Image (cartoon, coloured by chain):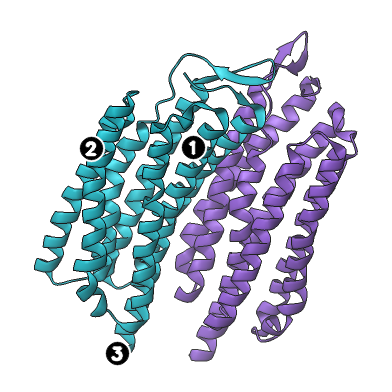
Chain colours: A purple, B cyan
């Protein structure tokens, strides 16, 4: 059952969710229109960035609808209606967007086809496994079940970090100098924002998730992490594509 | 009457349907934007791929709305409201998308006009017959009626397979080498995914469809088959168009 929220707590969560719908939608328009500003070979990276935030825009619309249906105003407080808040929309979103976020990062590197295909294969499978293994834990109310699936889901997460920070080093070093720092920062952004999700999951597992302020903190945290991980990463990808386009046009001229 | 579902069963079905709305919508944007990446003569294949997933996006929105209207939460279980779940939206979808899926496959082959028109005529008529003959069986609760229309619908399905795997062989062999394997795999994908639909229909006819877990399995199966048959085939078509574009631009240079 959803915890009772004060009017300010309820407003904070719903306003932030609504802000996210607007942010993701605007980011989608920006990435789609910016395709024209970069060389043809980097456009697919911007297309995929746009798809990620389009999918997230859709899901935040659903999440907001589900959250408002789960609450009703009674004596100045927001109490549960009994209709469950479907936080699992987040898993549906991640199942699609997390592999695509890795696709946009690899696409903007513009590696040789074989190398690119190998990396994409590994990263996509690991990303899907990471989300799919988290889901049975998320929908369970048993602590043991939650810990089990949480740890199983951590294995592909660590593997993704290994591919990005170890196996990808050579490819990053071959990039033009101006793009190197941006790519390393994009990688750090993935590490930092994706790290929030297991923290929120752990808070839920520790049973701290029963109070109103913890519920608010988790929803606010997920929302800010999603904006940074999706729209934020997309801005990095756009900058990397632009810097590489400029460097190549400069050397061609 | 719809079988009673547990909260997890209901969540699985509705989350997957919602995920399909997002997947089809994102795929539509991708196919429409990718038109610029292939030679002009292959763009119609990508346009049609985009139309198929746009139509499916719309229908999954309707299917999800109908499914949620058919259920209400009572004592922790989802029970039938009495409003029937309209699974026949699927037939409306297939009546439009199944002929178009065959159109995108033929279009990307870029055959001589006369050959192309002949194939399209035969395949479109067979596809419309296949769906239309299945419909009277689907809406009937009489096993005899269901078997009769099911078998009638199988005749055009077998004819489509005959056209794709026998009559089309010559045309496939004339394609550039790099595209041949992709086209054969696209054909196998059609065979494998379309094969799921008569299996689901047969399960319903055998009366196995009365239990909750069978209902869930059928809905999950239809959803995954639709994603693969539509968005998945579209990705194949895009790759075929890109490989053919590259081969032709390479030989022109």
What percent of the width, then of the height, locates residue B221? 49, 44
* B28 with respect to A135 (left or right): left
Pointer 3: what residue? Answer: B251
Could you tell me which residue is drawn at 11 percent across and 61 percent down?
A: B118
Pick whichever, A107 or B170, lies toward us. B170
Residues at discs 2 and 1 both on one chain: yes
Q: Residue at x 28, y 67 (%)?
A: B108
Foreground residue, A103 or B132?
B132
Q: Position of residue A166 (x, y in %)?
A: 77, 77
Structural crowding at the residue carrying mark 2, measured as other residues with C-alpha within 10 Å and reported as few (<14), some (14–19) or many (≥20):
some
Mark 2 or 1, nearer chain start: 2
Q: Visible in this render: residue B37?
A: no
Residue sitting at 12 percent across and 61 percent down? Answer: B117
Find disc 1 in the rendering and name its residue: B219
Question: How far is mark 2 from mark 3, CA to CA?
Answer: 47 Å
Position of residue A42 relative to residue B20, above or below, is below
């Amino acid at each position: 059952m959803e915890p009772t929220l004060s009017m300010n707590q309820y407003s904070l969560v719903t306003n932030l969710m609504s802000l996210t719908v607007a942010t993701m939608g605007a980011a989608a328009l920006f990435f789609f229109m910016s395709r024209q500003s970069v060389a043809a070979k980097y456009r697919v990276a911007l297309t995929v960035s746009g798809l990620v935030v389009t999918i997230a825009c859709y899901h935040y619309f659903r999440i907001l609808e589900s959250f408002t249906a789960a609450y009703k105003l009674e004596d100045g407080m927001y109490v549960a209606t009994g209709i469950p808040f479907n936080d699992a929309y987040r898993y549906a979103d991640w199942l699609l967007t997390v592999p695509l976020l890795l696709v946009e990062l690899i696409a903007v590197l513009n590696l040789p086809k074989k190398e690119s295909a190998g990396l994409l294969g590994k990263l996509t499978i690991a990303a899907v496994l990471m989300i799919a293994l988290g889901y049975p834990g998320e929908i369970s109310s048993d602590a043991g079940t939650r810990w089990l699936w949480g740890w199983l889901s951590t294995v592909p997460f660590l593997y993704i970090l290994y591919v990005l920070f170890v196996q990808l080093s050579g490819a990053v070093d071959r990039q033009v100098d101006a793009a190197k720092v941006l790519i390393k920062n994009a990688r750090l952004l993935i590490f930092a924002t994706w790290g929030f999700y297991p923290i929120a999951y752990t808070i839920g597992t520790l049973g701290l998730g029963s109070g109103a302020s913890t519920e608010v903190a988790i929803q606010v945290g997920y929302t800010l992490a999603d904006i940074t991980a999706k729209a934020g990463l997309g801005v990095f990808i756009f900058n990397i594509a632009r810097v590489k386009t400029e460097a190549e046009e400069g050397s061609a001229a």
